[in-house]
Amino acid sequence: MHPAPSVIIFTTLSGLGFGLLVFLGLGLPAVTGLTAFWFFAIGYVLAVGGLMSSTFHLGHPERAWKAFSQWRSSWLSREGICAVAALIIMALYGAGLVFFDSQWTILGWLGAALSLGTVFTTSMIYAQMKTVPRWHIPWTPAKFLTLSLAGGALLAGQAFAAIILLLLAAAITIATWIIGDGAFKASGTDMETATGLGAIGKVKAFEPPHTGTNYLLREFVHVVGRKHAFNLRVIAFVFAFVIPILLMVLLVNHVTAAIAILSHLIGVAVARWLFFAEAEHVVGLYYGKR
Amino acid sequence: MAQPTLELSPQVSDEIRKTTCYMCACRCGINVHMKDGKAAYIEGNRDHPVNQGVLCAKGSAGIMQVNAPSRLRAPLKRVGPRGSGEFEEISWEEAYGIAEGWLRPIREEDPSKLAFFTGRDQSQSFTSFWAQNFGTPNYAAHGGFCSVNMAAAGIYTMGGAFWEFGQPDWDHTKLFLLFGVAEDHDSNPIKMGLGKIKARGAKVIGVNPIRSGYNAVADEWVGITPGTDGLFILALVHCLMKAGKIDLDYLARWTNAPVLVDKDTGLLLRDKDGKELVIDRATGKPTAFDTQGVQPDLSATHKDGHKPVLHLMAERYMSEDYAPEAVAERCGIPAPRIRAIAAELARVAFEESFELPITWTDFRGETHTSMTARPVSMHSMRGISAHANGFQTCRALHVLQILLGTVEAPGGFRFKPPYPKPATAHPKPHVKVTANSPLNGPHLGFVHGPEDLALKEDGTPVRIDKAYTWENPMSAHGLMHMVISNAHAGDPYKIDTLFMYMANMSWNSSMNTTGTMKMLTDKDENGDYVIPHIIYSDAYSSEMVAYADLILPDTTYLERHDCISLLDRPICEADAAADAIRWPVIEPDRDVKGFQSALCDLGARLGLPGFTNEDGSQKYADYGDYITNHLRRPGIGPLAGWRGENGDQTGRGDPNPDQLQRYIDNGGFFVSHIPDGAQYMKPWNSAYQDWAVSMGLYDAPQPYLFSLYVEPMQKFRRAAEGHGDIQPPDHLRARVRENMDPLPFWSDPAPANMVDEYPITALTQRPMAMYHSWGTQNAWLRQLHGHNPLYMPTKLMRENGLSDGDWAKVTSPHGSITVPVMEMAALNENTVWTWNAIGKRKGAWALDNDAPEATRGFLLNHLIHELLPPRGDGMRWTNSDPITGQAAWFDLKVRIEKATAPTESQPAFPPIKSPVGKGPKDLAWKVGR
Amino acid sequence: MTQLPTSTQKKLGLVIDLDTCVGCHACVISCKGWNTENYGAPLSDQDPYGANPSGTFLNRVHSYEVTPLATSAKPHPTAQTIHFPKSCLHCEDAPCVTVCPTGASYKRVEDGIVLVNEADCIGCGLCAWACPYGARELDQDEGVMKKCTLCVDRIYNENLPEEDREPACVRTCPAGARHFGDFADPDSNVSRLTAERGGIDLMPEQGTKPVNQYLPPRPKDDLPEFDVLAPYLEPVAENPGGFIGWLDKALDKLPSKGAN
């Protein structure tokens, strides 16, 4: 899949933002007034900024409002609804903390649930794609949720939770890589089923339908070198998990926390790039590509 | 949310205008849907005899041809050096003035100083008429490098060949045998026919080194070694004759198999009226072949030892030289497979035969109550034709068809009017040049002996292309591919003006492209161009434009009049005679003019008799006027439909002033069906012969025998053996004697192409979605084929350590190219190939200089020369068939080695300046928006 | 309308005959021409005369080489070339429809045609992600998703003669390799062809239940070995002399001598 910067930025930032909002909704940390304002501001900048970024790749962003209509079947529609609901509820909850110095707990829990739900619906947009076997595994939502929560914990200054969640996310990330590497083969889709010609013999792509490129090749066929991918996985893992955990375990202060967050952000962004770039859409088979 | 309400019956267009396609040479009928006065959408015309509604990719992409940025906009005068592409736009008046200034003195002194050659011209009847009126003998179209072997072999053997000459009996055939590259001509009818065969589950055998296109759907693929088709066919003939699986009744009645051959001269025995003699099985006496009640005997020998043709064939083809085991290795086909195919031919022709209950009377007056089907059909085009042994190979194929009794039999091969038409019914070549006067007759025709050659009294060629000389006596289509090199060399003489139409000679239409560019720009010791003047007409900014001094801009095909005439290369079907027109369904938005209309103007300015009235005024205002009013013979004009003042006559009749409108009203074409009972066995079927006379196809019935043995060839051979007044020069004697064999034989073209050092054959074919160079300017088609790899068989890829996308250096005895490669498994293991004419010169066709056609695309033409490599005999032999002069570009031999990837395909040429600028960056074409 | 209808009245679709398709691209360009001029936005082309031309097409023809597995009877099987046209299969379980967030993508209740209502399309591309067949292309000029409409603006169009009320690709196909009809009707041309020739689903494991069916190529290169065919080539003579003798006898046996 084409690793579109807009989508990588969106999923990375909004995942982090909604993760922070989850913790804020649960009252972690229990902040009020100006402190609460800054925490909420960071959460909103990340979540809303991510959402805004995601509209950059739309052909018609002015019609984006129509996307709220199909919640019955569409995970993208559900994501939109969840995100807006989470942002509204959390705004009310945040207003209570910032302006009225009161914690409307139920509202917070609801906001936290919706924030987490937003991350889950985002993940399901990918996990539902049977056409991309690497994504079409239960570990995909698990990865999105744990990464979001781990990032949220880091931002919320919840050191212990952060360490636990980072360890969990690290384990799940490794699992998605290992399982994902075999997912295409396991899906049973190959050139023979794609063309229906398997009964005759081994199928090889000959002349392509067009000598130049097209939307499908640009969008769905992205080849990453094996060695390159491995190096990037190491970088992603070190930045997203190893550095933050070490920093959180060794000594916690504002500077190390900021470095840990930045490192985590870089790591998640690299992992997210890989999430797309390594994902192989079955349509590539028609072009003899994966 | 409810499902949206759709407009299910939108208005499709304001109007449909029906005309004829020109995206290739197939000439299908098209419906041009008009919106707001513009052409919006093109589809096939269901009523049209050629395509019956279907349309290929090229046809549907016509919209993008009509809006192509490469269209020329006005007459151009060269202002930079030749080849630079620097021009200024001028008026038509100035353009005509320049042309007249060059042409008038030529005509007054020596009309042969004009060489007028037209490329993919579909108005040869008209352009040749113009050239004839000018008086030059130097006229031809592109047949000499296209498929003259196929056409001439067919005409000499059976009075017609494939494509425009005839077609398989698609509705009855049970086995279809397809030889060689065939995707590019008669494309829709062949596809439609294949579809019919496939729908019935009948069998297709493809004989082709490359399994693409039609060969991909063939049930059996025979991946033959290029150039050996003749050997393979004669091995089939061997098997069939040995097994007696030949149609004796058919051979005895309709062919010259029983005709006696003089044992001393090799000529056919004839009676005092010149009729061929056969032995009558009833009387045992030599009798004229067409005598009523004669039973021609295939078995008996004349008392003086003269044998029938079939005996000579048995002596030759039953020889073990033609046994499958003897040819298998050279053909690259295992002997059992050759035998299996021969057996399958025999099985289907004779075991699956059936009778059609058609009563008919033959030319001997005998009435038959049925027709016997031989449901084996064949087709071939340039694949077997464009070899130095092509003529004899094409002959062999027709002999195979005839031995099986399939030609004109139900289920076999059927001629299309005006064919069948024997070689003797065609004109002979005319070359008598007189200053200020027309030529003495049509340029091109069929020779029947040395006396018909186009030689001056001193034995030198009359024609600049050396057609009809001892080098290639039966060059029925001329040799367009030799014109520039001969004119440059001044051999046989120098010319003053080269005038060409739709022929991309400085690029894909020449062998030896680099050399051709040099010849066109070469200067003499005075600093003048060796070819002093070049006039060129094209609709588009092709590579050739840059090499001309004066450009006459043609229109696109939707902006013009044309006639697809029975006098020319018609569009008939086996069931019907048909012709068609083009008419301006849109008006040009540029200062351009149909080339034929420009010739009407120019002809009048030059005072050519056929183009001026008695008072000296212009005879034809434009081509449409010519189509309506020209008479070739009394009552016979370019179009056969709606003749006579009231438009109620067919075939023959006076001009009808409303004729074009009648064609337009009828969908752009005219069809006259052959009567029932006359649709098969046409060369011998009285009902057909009478109908053909009524249509003006002949002036009298012309029944004839198929020529398994081609007597005119023996006449040339005898001359080479020292008989007669006109004999070949000594250095050509052996060659003429060997090649002018009246029975087909196979010769190997590989040694002359240095196969020992260059062991791989390199071929080109045209993709079905592209035609020549025209496709690359088409925004839709060039996305399908924007560059062309060299396809290599798996074995050669491995041997050379190549994988897809690598580059290879391909070297022939003449030159080398460096190009990208791609693997193909279903390919003869010693053959490589690529798509033809995808490669483009930078700056041409209004494409960007970094277009893939110019950076990754390439031509094989750079590897081919018009001459063969030197043999050490002091001579340079032409790279062509020694009988017809057909360019032998499928004989190309190469060697291949891996190369480091260059930045672009080699050789690369500097850009030419585009006289029309460049195209837009985006296209969202919607006329009816 | 993003939910799929539980059933449709008709199941309109195509049968594509891989035994007959010669790979000429006629359907590709005919489709491009019709759909540029008709339903919705034109199919645009970027850099049409430049280095990297790329446009929107709703139907494309791939080609494949298939090498049969070696057997003891055929140790060196011949590779086959197969042309493979591909456009929207109008799946019964069309994943492209259910993922659409705006309802722009829908499957028609009347005939099962899958369409994009361009006025509602936000160009998110998700439907193209969900389609395993590459049937959808986002038009770069218009920013909306384009796909095969099965020429919904032709097949019911009363401004067209009845015989033209079929998709443009079917009408134009020179070899007759494309057939249009109603798969819900077991007696339709497409149902019969599918049954007779063993029509197949592409990527059945994706669970999309495609309506369009592909007819597999008939067995190739299976001419019987020569020994089976040998009786048809039983020699009548070994040399020209024997042949002429045979001729004499054979001519006597010819049934039709003289007028009949």
Image (spheres, rainbow, N blue to C red):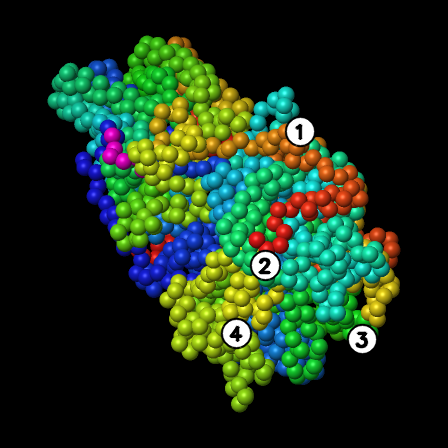
Please give left or right for residue B702 compared with residue B587 in the image. Answer: right
Q: Position of residue A250 (x, y in %)?
A: 40, 10
Asked which secondary structure carries label 1, the reply is helix
> How far is mark 2 from mark 4, CA to CA?
32 Å
Magenta span contains residue B223 = no
Labels 2 & 1 near each other (Cβ < 8 A): no
Q: Nearer the viewer, residue B238 or B609?
A: B238
Give x and y (percent) for residue B316: 78, 47
Give the percent coordinates (x, y) of residue A78: 24, 27
Q: Main secondary structure of the magenta part?
A: loop
Q: Chain of mark 1?
A: C
Left or right? Give the position of B917 relative to A75.
right
Dot 4: chain letter: B
The mark that comes first in sequence, 2 or 3, is: 2
Q: Which residue is mark 1?
A: C227
The magenta-colored residue range is: C7-12
Badge 3 element: loop
Name which of mark 3 and mark 4 comes first in the sequence.
Answer: 3
The circle on residue B457 is 3
The residue carrying mark 4 is B636
A148 over A281 or under it: above or below: above
Report, in whole angstroms, how far the alpha carbon at label 2 lies from the one at label 3.
49 Å
Nearest to the eye among marks 2 and 4: give it.
2
Q: In the image, what residue occupies the spot 79% across and 47% down?
A: B315
Q: CA distance from mark 1 to mark 3?
A: 61 Å
Question: Of tags 2 and 1, which is closer to the observer?
Answer: 2
Q: Do dots 1 and 3 share one subunit?
A: no
Say which residue label 2 marks: B366
